[in-house]
Image (cartoon, helix red, strand yellow):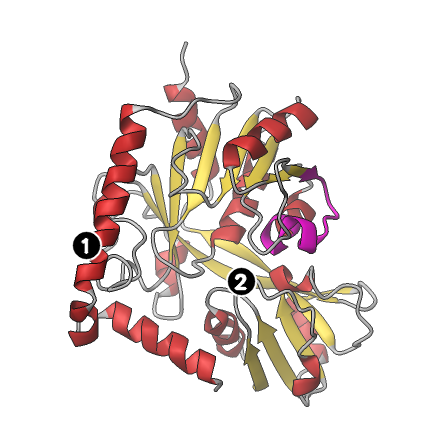
Amino acid sequence: MSFRQRLVERVHDIWQTPGLISTLLLPLSWLVWLFVTLKRRRWQKQPPARPTHLPVIVVGNLVVGGTGKTPVVIALVKGLQALGLRPGVISRGYGAQSAGAEARTGVAPLDPAQFGDEPSLIASATGAPVAVHPKRALALHALHSQWPEVNIVISDDGLQHLALARDIEVVVQDARGLGNGRLLPAGPLREPRSRLNTVDLIITNATAADTREAVTNPHRHKPLPGMPSHVPQLRMQLQPVSCTHLQTGEVIAWARWRQQFASARIGAVAAIGQPERFFGMLRRLGVTLDATLALPDHDTYKNPPFDKLDTTLILVTDKDAVKCLPTTDARLWSVQVSPRFSDDQWVEHLYRQLQSRSPT
């Protein structure tokens, strides 16, 4: 395990319980609380202007680090498309080169260096148009100008970006929950836990600690421990569906891939918020990983790390795959995952909620 991995795990341990180090950091958290509170009050007194008439759904998280937000955004876009809507996506474009004054817009395939890895993956998976800019309102305006047929917008992240007016807020969390419940840097929270009282839906990314019944049985209105009881909640679980050979584009169903390469020496690389979640998922499904490599979230893969792995095959996430193309390394396969929700009608429920708020 690298020094960075050990440091990240140590920080996560500190953030999970209200221990000594966390308590010593509380004065700094109070300053964060003051900043967040004053910021929210400012936008409450002067709500942001809407650059378009389009309804906006924000998908974000309250804690630092990856929670599985991107698969939720993809599922939401596909669900809205299935309802006959024409969604578009806006994002900050984290990890992309600076967009300057103008927002970048496009449809798949998108260059991750220009748009960021997550927007590139979302565009590829959904076919929806995408606009990126640190100021989401500028991205929204550019999206509407370029694709006037878009009639609903999903903001990939942006829960704390209060300059963007929104109609629906969805929070995605994982097994960490709210950790020790403290604000940065004493805990993992970007905003006070009371912020959950004002959102419209909480989705928990289930892990091995959750029973299969927790995902397969609908409990949409049953609150999870520590969560507000009046906010609808879902559980989801990410499951591999296929693997794609990055050099040739060949796609193989997950079960067949596992059977075909059962005796291979397999490595895995991930540059996501929680790399161990990817590695852990593979191990739980019976994949013996002979080597793993965790990279910083949004790593550009400008210097490919694959020579460090002495394995026959290497698995990467779809989010990382968009940055590895084109490749001459025949060992690389990306894993496509699909979220399974405890309520498969959740997008329809959310859209009905949005319609009920629209002016008549």
Which portion, as a residue range, is magenta? 105-120
Q: Position of residue 48 (x, y in %)?
A: 40, 26
Q: Which residue shows up at 38% across the image and 36% down it?
A: 162
Q: In the figure, 353 relative to 273: above or below?
A: above
Question: How many labels sit on residues?
Answer: 2
Q: Which residue shows up at 51% across the image and 79% down it?
A: 283
Horizontal arrangement in the rendering, residue 319 relative to residue 217 (left or right) = right
Q: Which residue shows up at 79% across the image and 76% down it?
A: 329
Q: Position of residue 334 (x, y in %)?
A: 67, 67
**Considering only order in the chain, which callout, 2 or 1, is on the residue closer to the N terminus?**
1
Q: For this rendering, which residue is in front, 291 or 9? A: 9
Q: For this rendering, which residue is in front, 9 or 254? A: 9
Horizontal arrangement in the rendering, residue 326 relative to residue 92 (left or right) = right
Q: Which residue is mark 1?
A: 30
Residue 170 appearing in the image = yes
Q: Position of residue 267 (x, y in %)?
A: 62, 82
Horizontal arrangement in the rendering, residue 297 relative to residue 219 (left or right) = right
Quarter occupied by residue 30: bottom left
- For disc 2, the neighbor class at 10 Å (few under 14, some 14 to 19, many from 20) is some
Q: Which residue shows up at 21% across the image and 69% down it?
A: 22
Q: For this rendering, which residue is in front, 274 or 303? A: 303
Q: Is residue 157 magenta?
A: no
Q: Which residue is mark 2?
A: 239
Specify the amino acid type for callout 2.
Answer: Gln
Q: Position of residue 263 (x, y in %)?
A: 68, 88
Horizontal arrangement in the rendering, residue 290 relative to residue 203 (left or right) = right
In this rendering, the label closer to the viewer, 1 or 2: 1
Specify the amino acid type for callout 1.
Answer: Trp
SS at mark 2 in the image: strand
